[in-house]
Image (cartoon, rainbow, N blue to C red):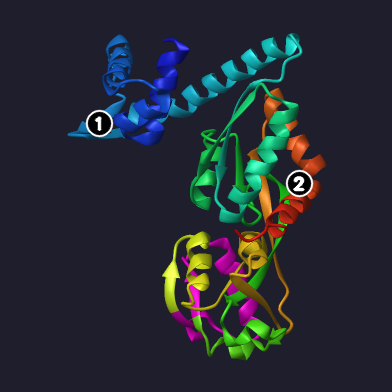
Amino acid sequence: MNLSELRVFVTAAEELNFSRAAQRLNLSQSAVSQNIQSIERAYGVELFLRHGRSVQLSETGKTILPMARAVLHSARILEDALMSARGEVSGVLSIGCATTCGRYFVPNLLASFQAEYPNVRTRVTPTTRSQVIEGVLAQTFDLGIVGRKTEHRELENQPLFEDRVIMIVPAGHPWANRDCVSPQEVLEQPFISRENTSATRQALFDELRQYGIEPENLNVVTELGDAEAVEMAVEKGIGITFISELMAARSLALGRVKKVEVEGFNLTQQIYLIRRKAETFTRAETRFWEFVQQHRQALAAELLYNLTNVKPG
């Protein structure tokens, strides 16, 4: 069995769909099927149970999947060691991102990192928090970006940046010229909410409960699954919301929405970078982790400055 066959098997096992696996690998679907069948014929086993167009791992497939991942990881470390002998920092970093504001921060971070390490390629996949954690544990992702600290014995966290959660209202709202409102006044307004899985929503509701405000007491007029859609809904005058200051920075600078303080309300959200605990990392993984430690505060300040210093038109 060669490494390319193992890579096809692992990708197909992660996707449980030969067509999506083919897209990830830049192969034809028939090539993926042939690779899988080649392994199955060579060893007289069945790796996948096929039901029409859907597939699932057989018991044998489930057994060898972690071993196959370990072999591919070892091969990657070996290749990295050979590259290191030439003094190169290269390779591919796969990053799962579970926060919308993280998607604002990441391009700035990657641009700075790749300016210093131009031979490292990065691939960022927006997905849910649970899928990021599962992906890092399964080594589908080398690194993950999540909206709150992850407590898991096999994972380590480091802060990426801190973001403030603020209340915004439409530019023409009666509160637009007010500096501050009380928490109880929030209950009177049409409210735009994020979906249940949002880390910002969970942190917000925990904060509101300290003022005796339960989520069900809010006058929720619509619930949206994306922070950008929420911010746009406020711009259109549908209601008010609490949102990442980073997400709202450009619209605030352009005067499309207004920030209003809530008495006693001070909520910050720490965004974390996570990785799997391991004895050995590639040089690219190590350098990226160290780069974040050294530059995260300067990069966050630079991004906020760029977002808030925009001109209309």
Numbered badge on residue 299: 2
On residue 49, the disc is 1
Q: Is residue 205 magenta?
A: yes
State the separation of the CA atoms marked 2 and 1: 48 Å
Query: Is residue 215 visible to the viewer in this orientation of the structure?
Result: yes
- Viewer-closest of 268 and 277: 268
> Is there any visible trace of residue 212 in the rendered image?
no
Closer to the camera in the image, 239 or 216? 239
Closest to the observer, 174 or 185: 174
Q: Within 10 Å of the Cα at label 1, are there few (<14), some (14-19), or many (20+) other Cα atoms?
A: few
Which three-letter amino acid code belongs to the residue tagged 2? Leu
- Residue depicted at 54% across the width and 24% down the height: 70
Q: Position of residue 96 (x, y in %)?
A: 55, 42
**What's under tag 1, amino acid-wise?**
Leu
Is 222 rendered above or below residue 226? below
* Residue drawn at x 74%, y 51% as measured from the top left: 300
Q: Position of residue 58 (x, y in %)?
A: 31, 31
Query: Could you say which quadrant of the image residue 95 lies in?
Result: top right
* Residue 69: % across, % down: 50, 25
Mark 2: secondary structure = helix
Q: Which residues are magenta?
A: 191-220
The quadrant where residue 200 appears: bottom right
- Seen in the image, is 274 located left or right of residue 57? right
193 in magenta: yes
Using the image, determine if residue 294 lies above or below residue 212: above
* Residue drawn at (41%, 24%) of the image: 25
Q: For the N terminus, which image quadrant?
A: top left
Q: Is residue 38 left or right of residue 64?
A: left
State the residue lying farthest toward the left: 52
What label sits on residue 160 in the rendered view? none
